[in-house]
Image: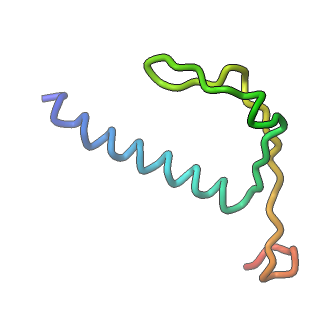
Amino acid sequence: MASLHLPISQKYAVMEMKTIVTSILRNYSIESLDSRDKVLPVMQITLHPSIPIRMRIRPRRNIECGGTACL
């Protein structure tokens, strides 16, 4: 019986991750601190970066509201 619940919870988890990532990308500007030639993909079962990816995350300025939060 437990196997019947797995696909529903798995789909919900993927949907929840997409919602969180979308929210972050809409509200923050993300920029890499390292150049593309420094971070190389490493072939394994899945691709991984050759070094940890360092990034800067900054709040976006809302152009429609003049840089202030819209309510």
Q: In the displayed image of the protein, which residue is found farthest to the front? A: 37
Up-down: is 9 above or below 19? above
Up-down: is 53 above or below 28? above
Number of numbered discs present? 0
Residue at image point 73% right, 79% down = 71
Q: In the displayed image of the protein, which residue is found farthest to the left? A: 1
Q: Is residue 7 left or right of residue 50?
A: left
> Percent x, y for residue 42?
58, 20
Residue at image point 41% right, 44% down = 14
> In terms of depth relative to the viewer, which is nearer, 41 or 23?
41
> In terms of depth relative to the viewer, which is nearer, 43 or 30?
43
Q: Name the image quarter holding residue 61.
A: bottom right
Q: Is residue 58 left or right of residue 48?
A: right
Residue at image point 26% right, 43% down = 8
Residue at image point 66% right, 56% down = 25
Up-down: is 29 above or below 37? below
Q: Is residue 71 left or right of residue 14?
A: right
Q: Name the image quarter holding residue 9.
A: top left
Q: Quadrant of the N terminus?
A: top left
Up-down: is 44 above or below 31? above
Q: In the displayed image of the protein, which residue is found farthest to the right? A: 67
> Percent x, y for residue 6?
25, 34
Query: What is the basis of the colouring in this image?
Result: rainbow
Q: Name the image quarter holding residue 29.
A: bottom right
